[in-house]
Image (spheres, rainbow, N blue to C red):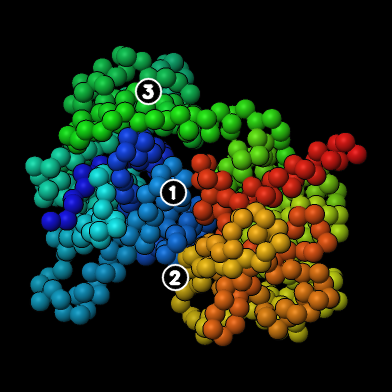
Amino acid sequence: MDKVPRYVFVTGGVVSSVGKGIVAASLGMLLESRGLKIAMMKFDPYINVDPGTMNPYEHGEVFVTDDGAETDLDLGHYQRFTHAKISQKSNVTAGSVYNAVIQKERRGEYLGKTVQVIPHITDEIKARIRMLTAEPEDEADVAIIEVGGTVGDIESLPFLEAIRQYHLDISPVPCCFVHVTLLPFIAAAGELKTKPTQHSVRALRDIGIFPNVIICRSGTHSLSPEHRRKIAMFCNVTEDAIIGAEDISPVYAIPLNFRRQHFDDIVLRVLQLDAPEGDLTAWCQMLDRMKNPRYEVRIAAVGKYIAHDDAYKSINEAFAHAGIANDCKVHLQWIDSEQFENGVSPEDVLKDFDGVLIGPGFGKRGIEGKIRAVQYVREKRVPFLGICLGMQIAIIEIARNCLGLKKANSTEFDPDTPDPVICLLTEQQGIKEMGGTMRLGAYRCVLKPGTLAHQAYKRDIIFERHRHRYEFNNAYRSRMEQEAGLVVSGVHPRTDHELVEISELRDHPWFCASQFHPEFTSTPMRPQPLFTAFIKAALERKISSNHA
Ligand code: GLN
């Protein structure tokens, strides 16, 4: 018989954004440290089939998996904290569940029955839970499943009902329910309040879910023994299973706070599993390096005005990881590119930085300003990293200012440009549907020896993830290489032609731009090579200019 994992379900109460993703990821990390194999999954109660069509400035970043799924940013946390395989199966939205059920109904698979939330939607959700670990290579000891949204929301109900049933279905095998809540601090009373937690646990119990562990977010205040006693008594949970979760920075320190409070021991006790105590030495050493850096660098990220902190989550984290690798604190500052279109000179703003990033993006706004920023870093020999749109901008700038193709552009921004140095592949032409139709997921990239990219990765072949429609136009490749100093340092070989995946400049200390997204594979224990090399170059520039 297939090996069936034990399940941990993580729910949230009181407010949204309470930190369920980090709780789930931290638990995964602690269980892995004890030798257990884990699987991770997130339910999202919205009706979008995936977050790929959602505005990242409202919803946060779209995290892309190796197999090309566009997923919620919490999956990025899972990947940064654990070794769990993150794939298409790891993110299940209400939209994808309804979509599957409606398609089955159209095919007549419900044999004339009325199709309903219970049992048809809940059955589909339960099938997704089983699918997560059904293949032999996906087997796990523990599957951690985070239910997005907040208990009490209408949208979350089918998911909560499904996990309630699932618990019953696999009984007597135990499940562990972890509920994450907020204790608001009322300044006038000078105390943390437990009442909203009591109410949210009551709402959960009404649905038939009885939490085994309650994680209490408490801001900058700490949980007293009195709070623990009170929550334990009102919520019917043992006192040791009330876990305090003060705000802690950096996020990678959070698992250690949970470990001190025996969160993992309690979960294993509920699951009736035995596992030896974990060894967290390497993680602690990583944290130590992160907290006590010897150097610092300033990096400018030139882009649109960013209101949502999470819109570039993986990039922010990848810089923190590259900092660990270089014993260096990376200060990342977002710079609005539109000012460079309105009379502000890039030099005036960017001269105080040790390196410049142009990151991913869509749409025309701010493009010309970004092109000016690239011209500045190319001419002034400032370390530059371009990611996806960042590479496309670099190619446009080089074509315009080194080849003299003054109107060179991407057909995304100017469909009638005489020099479409960035354009759609034939297979992308004619696509009308927005969802899931970009070039997505990991592709093989062959690196050219002797290039910056090869020096960074120290490998001939790499796999990195993509999320874009437009590509480098090979019609311009030989001129760009021969006349403009461009080096194509990595390609994806295909039978018809090669796709340019990463390129750099011959006469520049460090100028590298990739069509793929290196940020999606970075973790604090394995910092991403391209980010690491970029920060190293920025640091070297800073040190040498200080001594100049
Ligand atoms: N808009 C560009 C494209 O679709 C770049 C996308 C991105 O930066 N992720 O190709």
In three-dimensional space, the C-alpha distance between marks 3 and 2, rounded to whole angstroms, equals: 42 Å
Position of residue 107 in the picture relative to residue 264 (left or right): left
Looking at marks 2 and 1 on the same chain, the residue that comes earlier in the sequence is marked by 1
Identify the element where label 3 is drawn. helix
In the rendered image, which residue does mark 1 sit on? 79
Q: Residue furthest right?
A: 548
The picture quadrant where one finds residue 110 is bottom left
Q: Report x, y in % for residue 154.
A: 28, 51
Q: For the point 57% across and 72% down, which residue is it?
A: 492
Mark 3 near mark 2, Cβ–Cβ under 8 Å? no
The picture quadrant where one finds residue 341 is bottom right
Mark 2 near mark 1, Cβ–Cβ under 8 Å? no
In the rendered image, which residue does mark 2 sit on? 436
In the rendered image, which residue does mark 3 sit on? 260
Position of residue 68 in the picture relative to residue 125 (left or right): right
Q: Is residue 94 visible?
A: yes
Q: Report x, y in % for residue 399.
A: 79, 74
Looking at marks 3 and 2 on the same chain, the residue that comes earlier in the sequence is marked by 3
Q: 37 and 98: which one is in front?
A: 37
Please, what is the three-letter code of the amino acid marked with disc 3? Arg
Please, what is the three-letter code of the amino acid marked with disc 2? Gly
Task: Examine the rendered structure and indicate whether residue 115 appears above or below residue 182.
Answer: below
Query: What's the mark number on residue 379?
Result: none
For the residue carrying disc 1, how many other residues have a C-alpha within 10 Å: few (<14), some (14-19), or many (20+)? Answer: many
Q: Report x, y in % for residue 76.
A: 46, 50
Looking at marks 1 and 3 on the same chain, the residue that comes earlier in the sequence is marked by 1
Q: For the point 10% across and 72% down, which residue is it?
A: 113
Identify the element where label 1 is drawn. helix
